[in-house]
Image (cartoon, rainbow, N blue to C red):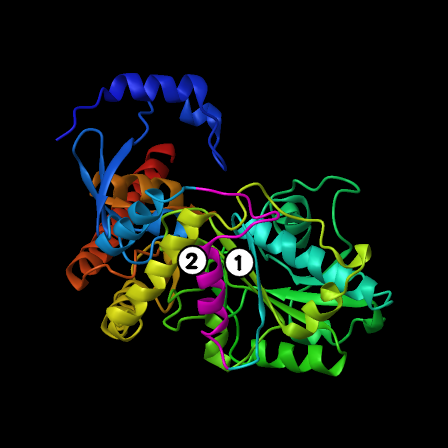
Amino acid sequence: MDSWNTEQLASDDKRYVWHPFTSMGEWCASDHEPIVLVGGEGAMVRDSRGREYIDGNSSIWTNVHGHNHPRINAAILEQLERVAHTSFLGTTNPPAIKLAREIVNLFPEEKFGRVFYSDDGSTGMEAALRIVSQYWKLRGSRRRTFISFRNAYHGDTAGAASLGSAAMFGSEIDGFHFPVRRVGSVEELSEIPFTDEVAAVAIEPIVQGAAGMRVWPRGTLRQLREWCDEFETLLIADEVMTGFGRTGRMFACEHEDVHPDLYVFAKGLTGGYLPLAITLITDKIFEPFGHNNPDATLFYGHSYTGNALGCAAALASLEIFRLENTIEALTPKIELLQRGLQAMEQASGIEEARSCGMIGAIDLAWGPSAAEVCQVAREKGLLTRHIRNTVTLMPPLIVSTGQLERALDILKESIQIVVSRTGNRRRSLE
């Protein structure tokens, strides 16, 4: 086993590293020791002190088939021996070509036709917004306004953030966003005037992630598709979090038999190995971009677009879905997660518990602190995160039933401990 100097690593991290979505004052406090992760196998990860944890948030909702999967490892190594990265501006590469064909062929014939590569969910959404805006411009339309849903999260780049997270986190910058209108439901959407100015509607289908794993009422996606069809506007499905088995189907839109005009995939696309995103579009949307004139060029892209290693990992991940019957094997785990969360709902300190596929969420009542629950769970061998006062549980799809049962037990125990502490603190104040 490797030997790690945890104290030095923690000290250097606090001195030199800036972590996202993290209160750096708390992180750098003298009594806080960061967990330094150095290894992983299946649904488990290991830190520099040799402690093992169930990866209860799939390494921020990305990991699908587990850590160190031999097939993905081999695919990356095989490609690495050829070439790690080449420009996608003016040249191409076999893994990117094969992956584009594979993704298009996952859907019914002629539903989708083109894949645009980027780096992550935010840039995949950014590409979608740019494509839609330019599409309508090339068609001579004045459609420029996007519609998103309140509490939506579509990423942190300027355009993607204007759809949701900028308002959610209070980080809006004047004049640095696409024109957006936000609604709370399809019914509210129907009341919006001037629909001939709407370029597209964006939605996280079936589940809103950063909103606290909020499940949409049944039929929402179908109603939204019908609304977009009626007013001849486009529908963007942000499946960055929900795609590749997370909701119990390969893609969340399958739950209501809906096809958007643009899909955005990332996170689980490479099995959680490498940053890669796809904006998948219909041939209809691509058509005006295929003309031989300067205005038809999409001036958007990144240095690592179409990265060969990422595409090789994604191809291997798709192969695992086929060979290991990943989706079919989820049924007993989904049922176990649902039963486990339902059993918790009556416990003290829990306001609501819910699940959708392999997504679990527990809303805590006013007393317990979700951050404190996650900290106690870490001490017991479970890594997960909270969203405000909601504790999430989203292990890799490969998680065993035994590991899932253990994760549920740890969460229940951790909540009980925090509830007890909270009660003791209140009594001492009285």
* Residue 292 painted magenta: no
Q: Is residue 357 above or below residue 67?
A: below
Q: Is residue 109 above or below residue 285?
A: below
Q: Is residue 103 visible?
A: yes
Is 365 displayed left or right of 205 in the figure? left
Q: Which residue is mark 2?
A: 269
Quarter of the view holding residue 84: top left
* Residue 97 painted magenta: yes
Report the front residue among 241 and 318: 318
Q: Amino acid at mark 2?
A: Leu
Dividing the image into 4 quarters, which one contains the C terminus? top left
State the image coordinates of residue 284 (x, y, percent, origin top left). 69, 74
For label 1, the SS is strand
Identify the residue shown where x is 50% and y is 71%. Answer: 104
Q: Amino acid at mark 1?
A: Ile
Circles 1 and 2: CB distance less than 8 Å? Answer: yes
Q: Which residues are magenta?
A: 85-108
Report the front residue among 262 and 363: 262
Dividing the image into 4 quarters, which one contains the N terminus? top left
Q: Which residue is mark 1?
A: 278
Q: Earlier in the sequence, mark 1 or mark 2?
A: 2
Identify the residue shown where x is 28% and y is 58%. Answer: 65
For label 2, the SS is helix
Q: Is residue 369 visible?
A: no
Report the front residue among 307 and 213: 307
State the image coordinates of residue 309 (x, y, percent, origin top left). 40, 47
